[in-house]
Structures are given as structure tokens and as C-alpha cells.
Amino acid sequence: MNSSVLKSVALKSGATVCGIADANAFDVHAPEKHRPGDLLPGARSVVVVGGAQPREGDWAATSPWVMQSMGTTERIQSVGRRLAQYIESELGYYALYVPPGTASGDTPFLSFMLAAQLAGLGSKSLAGPVLNREHGFMYWSAVITTAPLDADGPESAAACPAPPCREMWEREGTTPCLKICPASAGGCLSGKLENGRAVQTYYDAARCNTRVHTHWVGGFQKVLEETLNEPDRDKRKMLLYGDFFTRSLWAITYSSTNIAQCFECMRVCPAAHGRKEMR
Amino acid sequence: MSVFKLDPDVYKRYKDEVLKLCNSFQKIDQPGLSDQQIAERLGLDERTVTEIRCVAERDCYSLDEWEKAIEFKKKATLEWSALALKRPDLKPK
């Protein structure tokens, strides 16, 4: 089934990019229960949309709390929901909008990053996030469907490592993302390039969670534990009424949209966003 | 009737192994195992592995690490603002 009309609907609805992955292509990469057919039996295709990138003003803001309020999956999620509706109402096939939450703990229902790669929209970077060759870092949403759509193949050339990063590796033995967040010095990442390609990577997801979800579920649980263990009533109050716990509650109650909260590996990445000078 | 409660002794015994086998520490071409695969390898049931993994993911670092994250982001953000806006005065001291 020709997917061009669906892609056109996606772009008109606000997506920056749209691609289709073959649902069966997940089988060799994703563990059981995290494949399209596990969520929607009979799945044939996965429609992936990307967009809602931070703007230059967001990247340049002096407060990290700006990015963690503006950098959100919310806008691209609405495109995903609209596509699911379109597939069912106009094409007459089942369409499952993949929930952006987690299936258990910090594990997603379906890896959006894998979906984006299999739909030919980008490739995994040394820092982890999937980067689109033209638009860099973006947010993703996906719809699993029984519709037999024409699939796009994965990208053949990766955006990462970008030429400036390869040059930096030759010069300094590191790259911008590895330098800003090194696992060897309390960060999340390490890796190695050979002949301009990543041959070793390491990503500490638990530490990344302390940064990317500082004022989120994890932070809430940690302060709550600290509070329950604190015998002094006044000290308990300081913890519960303090900025950390208050900000976490604002975040997790969606009073302010607040999802990703650390962007430092992407901020310094030449492939993630071009540093365009504005007036 | 109550929610599933993991035995703390079971958690302590298997925490490190589960963290090592799941997706918490990712390396190129070494995908983490699913809870079911870990359960088969360690001789546990899947639900127990899921609970061990969920608790361990949060238990991996102390609250201090969350505080360090705030300082890391404040500093990195100001350094970038100084560079992008060509305002060296914004650089953190």
C-alpha cells in the first residue's frame, strides 16, 4: 500500500519527518514483548514521525529549566495520535498509537529510537539519541498498524560521528558528547572511534536518569525515601517543601510539561543541531 | 490481597547480575536481555526479575547524584549560552 498520502498527512499535521518501518524488522533487534506484533497482533507496519526540536533560543537559554520545560515529546505525540485516527477512519486498518510511557520501570513499550532507525529516519549517535541527517536531534512518536504500507529501509549513512567530531577525535581522542559527559568522570558516556566510526560505546542509563529525569519520577522516589528515613519532623518538612521536591511534583503532575531534563550531550553535538546565529 | 512485594534478600542477591544483563549499561552490539531472558538465565521467574530491575534502576545511584546533576546542567547550560550568544560574561565562575 502506497504510504505517500499518509506521509503527507503526517507532515501537514506538524511532523518534520515521517517514515515507515516493516513491523517484522523489529524481531531481530527488540526483545520479546517489545515488538510491534506483541502490542498489536497482526501488525504489519510501524509509522514513525519525528519533529518538535528545540529552537535556537531554547538551546541558548541561560537556565537549564527552560529546556526541560520546552523540550517535550508532547507536540509530536499529537501528530502520532492524529495518524492513528487517520489510519483507522480513512484506511480501515487497526492502528495502535504507541504510548510514550513505560511498560515496566524505565523500559518503554516499544523503542522509538529503534523504530526511527528502521523507518530510515536516522541513526543512533555515540551519545545514544537517534539523529536525523538533515534535522539532527528530534522527538519521536510511533503508530503500529495492520495496514500493509510500503516500508522505508534504514539509513545507509549515519549522521554521527559528524566531520568535526572525527577531527576532534584525531586531535584529542574524544568527541564533544564524550567530553561533556564522560563516564570516567561522573558522566554517562564513553566510546572509541576507528576510521571515523564508533567501534566502542558505553552508556550508563541509570546515571543518565539522574540527569535527564532529575525532577521526575526517580527524583521524587529518592526524596520520598530520604524523607521516610528522616526521624526529625522539621527536617522532613524541609525536604518535602524544598525546591527539589516541589519542582519534581510540578513536573510529574504535568502542571508544567516536563519530560526530558538533560540535553548536554546533544547541546554540544554538531550533528544534533546546527548552531545558527540569530540576531 | 496486596501488590507484589519483592523479598529484599532476593533483591540484594540478584541486583548486580540483573543490572549487568539488562539494558542499564549499554554497549555497542551488546543489547540488554529482556526480563524473561534474564529470568531463564538466573533461574528466577519473570515477575521477580522485573521487580529487581525496576528497583535496581532507581537504587543504582544515591540522591547525591541527583543533586550533582543539577549543578552539572547549570554549569553546562551557562557555558553554552556564553559560547552561542558570544557573551563570555555569562560563563560560570
Image: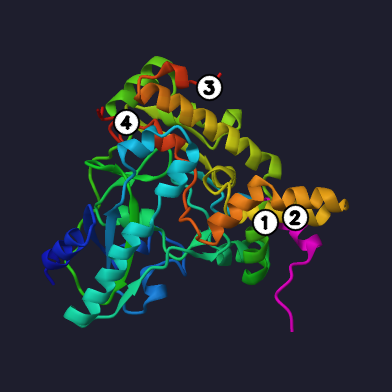
Q: Which chain hosts label 1? A: A
**Residue position marked by numbered label 3 in the rendering:** B92
**Farthest right residue in view:** A231
Q: Which chain hosts label 2? A: A
Labelled disc at residue A221: 1
Q: Which percent across, then down, holds residue B5?
A: 74, 71
Alpha-carbon distance for marks 2 and 1?
Answer: 6 Å
Q: Which percent across, then down, holds residue A91?
A: 17, 79
Alpha-carbon distance for marks 1 and 3?
Answer: 30 Å
Pointer 2 or 4: first along the chain: 2
Labelled disc at residue A270: 4
Circle 1 crowding by C-alpha within 10 Å: few under 14, some 14–19, many from 20 = some
Label 4 SS:
loop
Q: Nearer the viewer, mark 3 or mark 4?
A: 3
- Of the residues shown, which amino acid type is indicated by label 4? Pro
- Of the residues shown, which amino acid type is indicated by label 2? Glu
| Quarter of the figure with the C terminus of chain B | top right
Is residue B48 positioned above or below B33 on the image?
below
Q: Nearer the viewer, mark 3 or mark 2?
A: 3
- Circles 2 and 1 in contact, beta carbons < 8 Å: yes
